[in-house]
Every structure is written in structure tokens, then in C-alpha cells.
Image (spheres, rainbow, N blue to C red):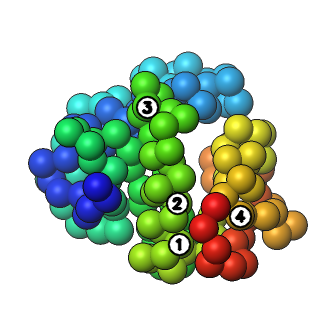
């Protein structure tokens, strides 16, 4: 089931975000100070608990417990992460379809070097627009992807 995130989901959301980002971004950024020093579960969970407005536009995929997180901003997927233990189970696809069908999301930005994520989005109907820019505070580029139709993938 996909539902709006609540403050009660804060620790699980933080856990998924932190560990998934470490797994996927460490090989791109090569910055252990950020991966293991600055990005921590407890402070992120605390931030959600103390500032529930940060959960605006955040949805979770729950099946006995939270297994995936989707963050929507206007017509854009801002974040989509699935706990690495549950990858390749269709959760990411369900979150994308929810974003497209229920939240009218058509665009997203993804790290240019994150080839797995780019392939995943392409599999679900997104294509690069040609737009690219530096990811703030990093030397890495992000590329824009857009989905043109509503067909289910």
C-alpha cells in the first residue's frame, strides 16, 4: 500500500534514505566524510519528527512495514528510494506509477553517473530531455528526465 508519510514513519524513512544513498552514491562521490559523517539516521529522523512539514509530499510503500519512499514536489519526483533488501520486487515501479497517476509527476532529475537509476527510469517511460546541470555543492552533473505519456510500464 502507498500512503502519505507520517511522523511515525520518520525513523524508517531516515534509515532507507541514509543507507540507500550510501550504497548508491559513495561510488560516485567517493566522499566518506559525507557518507558516514554528515549523513546519519538519527539526525534526519529527528528533523522529520521536529519539523513534520518536511514530510509534505512524502509517500511510503508499506507492506507490513515501510519498504520504499517517494518524495514529490509539484510535478516532479524529487526522491525515490527502496530499501536495498527489497530491490527488484516491483516496489520502485509501483511508486513511480503512483507518482505519475496520482500526483501527475512527469519530470525528475537524476545523477548522470547513476546508470542503474537512469536505466530504471527509462524502463518506466522516462527519457532524458537533454537538460543537465551541476548538482549543488558537487562536481557531478544531474540530468533531467521526463515522461510524456500515461501508459503503464
58 lies above or below 82? below
Could you say whether the residue bearing mark 3 is in a helix, strand or loop? helix
Pointer 2 residue? 96
- Cα–Cα gap, marks 2 and 4: 10 Å
Nearest to N terminus: mark 4 or mark 1: 1
Q: Are marks 4 and 1 in contact (CB under 8 Å)?
A: yes
Pointer 3 residue? 86
Numbered badge on residue 29: none
Residue 126 picture location, percent across and down: 72, 64
Left or right of 70? Residue 6 is left
Could you say whether the residue bearing mark 4 is in a helix, strand or loop? loop
Pointer 1 residue? 100
- Local packing at callout 3 (Cα closer than 10 Å; few below 14, some 14-19, many 20+) is few
- Mark yes or no: residue 4 visible: yes
Residue at position x 24%, y 58% in the image = 5
Which image quadrant: the N terminus? bottom left
Pointer 4 residue? 125
Most foreground residue, 106 or 32:
106
Nearest to N terminus: mark 1 or mark 3: 3
Could you say whether the residue bearing mark 1 is in a helix, strand or loop? helix
Residue at position x 64%, y 74% in the image = 151
Residue at position x 70%, y 30% in the image = 28
Most distant residue in the front direction: 152
- Cα–Cα gap, marks 1 and 3: 22 Å
- Cα–Cα gap, marks 3 and 2: 16 Å
Nearest to N terminus: mark 2 or mark 4: 2
Amino acid at each position: 500500500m502507498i500512503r502519505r508519510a507520517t511522523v511515525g514513519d520518520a525513523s524508517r524513512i531516515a534509515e532507507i534514505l541514509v543507507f540507500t544513498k550510501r550504497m548508491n552514491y559513495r561510488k560516485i562521490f567517493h566522499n566518506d566524510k559525507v557518507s558516514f559523517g554528515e549523513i546519519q539516521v538519527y539526525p534526519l529522523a529527528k528533523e522529520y519528527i521536529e519539523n513534520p512539514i518536511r514530510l509534505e509530499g512524502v509517500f511510503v510503500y508499506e507492506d507490513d512495514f515501510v519498504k520504499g519512499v517517494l518524495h514529490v514536489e509539484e510535478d516532479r519526483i524529487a526522491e525515490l528510494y527502496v530499501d536495498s533488501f527489497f530491490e527488484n520486487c516491483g516496489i520502485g515501479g509501483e511508486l513511480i506509477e503512483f507518482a505519475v497517476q496520482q500526483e501527475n509527476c512527469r519530470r525528475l532529475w537524476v545523477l548522470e553517473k547513476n546508470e542503474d537509476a537512469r536505466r530504471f527510469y527509462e524502463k518506466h517511460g522516462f527519457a532524458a530531455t537533454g537538460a543537465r546541470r551541476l548538482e549543488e555543492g558537487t562536481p557531478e552533473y544531474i540530468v533531467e528526465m521526463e515522461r510524456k505519456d500515461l501508459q503503464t510500464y
